[in-house]
Image: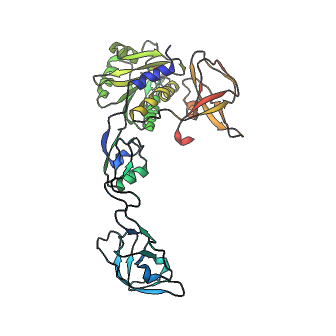
Amino acid sequence: MKSVDDHLAEGLAAVGPLPAVDVALLEAADCLLAEDVVSPIQLPSFVNSSMDGYAVRMADVAGAAADRAVVLPVVGDLPAGSVEEVRLEPGTAVRIMTGAPAPVGAEAVVPVEWTDRGVARVRIEQAPQPGAYLRAAGEDVEAGETVLRAGVRLTPRHIALLAAVGRDHVLVRPRPRVVVISTGSELVEPGRRLGFGKIHDSNGYGLTAAAAEVGALTHHVGIVEDDPQVLMSALEGHLAGADLVITSGGVSAGAFDTVKEVLSRLGTVRFDKVAMQPGMPQGFGTLGPDRVPIFTLPGNPVSAMVSFEVFVRPVLRKMWGETNLHRPEVSAAAARDWPSPAEKRQFVRAVLERGSDGSFVVTPVGGQGSHLVADLAEATCLAVVPEQVTQVRAGDMLRCLLLDRARQ
Ligand code: AMP
Ligand code: MG
């Protein structure tokens, strides 16, 4: 039997970060930046006011106070966006709005709140500090400054910065394009009536959502019946433009395990028994002239989702340029005893809680059968029981992989 680590290593070795592409700024959100970004301009690019108020010279307002107000003629109005080059003559004030360029000669801005808001003349009841409420040119970013380095995962704040320095497109690692195919003649689309012996395709939806959560652009193909011809043409039809293919079902030892039957013949996909529970039957390889990587996951819904977590997610993260490939994990004490199969790494669907002393406690959810989707949905982590352990005892410390960022 192949080890979990070997199967993962094989997948990781077959892929690298996707070639960088130049995309429109909003498409870059969440992507990994693939260039150093140098600002061609300084920010602020001109001295401007940070308040609505009056631009003044210090000598004219020195000593202004509530009982000794200074009155100055207002000789101009500067709204934001004003392009006039205005000079502030001694003994005058210019009304100025937030973001408007300061007039030449202005030494401070007196906020409107310190005045009578006069239009022709203004009464100033408090003296500002020199330079008050003036934003200096270049105080944020200097022209020629590197504002972002390659490798940054672009948050909304980074997108705002890129826009501020004038970039409307940027080089990033593209989102991997992932094709998801569910195989099985027993499958019916959710929303359709179930006949006897049929089940809804849950893997297709779960795996597509999981790939999207990693950041992939997903193509949910839907159900393909257990027929070699139909499967082959479905695979061929969806290879173009795919960076990764995921199938579920049809890889065990049954008579109608079509995925295994069809892909074994091509010789580019290897089928292995991987020493894990759940998820033992796994296949990985490449398809077509472009050697598109394909993971053929087992059909049982829990096995499919656990296999995605353990093998597909790290590979997708690597393709998207990430270097930290794995889920965050914590160490937690087992809340009770349970058995674990010999020679297999067990991934136990479990709920993580904090004990009274703040340390983590992990409790398996309901049944561990590979078909139990309701119990899987309840889990917030996968507790990992090492291969050599056959019996977990209450209090044993286990690595727990945290699922679902949003729920922690
Ligand atoms: P297989 O790997 O095709 O032998 O399937 C193993 C088990 O998983 C069977 O009980 C299938 O009915 C079930 N199964 C396969 N594909 C799916 C799917 N897309 N959604 C839900 N269950 C599935
Ligand atoms: Mg099947």
Q: Does any portion of residue 201 appear in the rendered image?
A: no
Q: Residue furthest front?
A: 59
Would you place residue 8 above or below residue 165 in this image? above
Is 14 left or right of 352, judged from the image as shown? left
Front in this rendered view, residue 159 or 187: 159
- Whether residue 207 is visible to the viewer of this picture, yes or no, is yes
Taking the spot 40% from the left edge, 65% from the top edge, the residue there is 136
Instruction: Using residue 310 as the reference point, say whether residue 343 is left or right of it.
Output: right
Camera-nearest residue between 317 and 363: 317
Image quarter for residue 348?
Answer: top right
Q: On the rendering, which quadrant does ligand 2 occupy?
A: top left
List x then y, in percent, for residue 26. 35, 48
- Give the number of callouts: 0
Residue 260 coordinates in the image, percent (x, y): 40, 16
Coloured how? rainbow
Above or below — where is 337 with respect to 113? above
Residue 227 % position (x, y): 36, 18
Residue drawn at x 38%, y 61% is 138
Where is 276 relative to 325, above or below? Answer: above
Residue most toward the right?
356
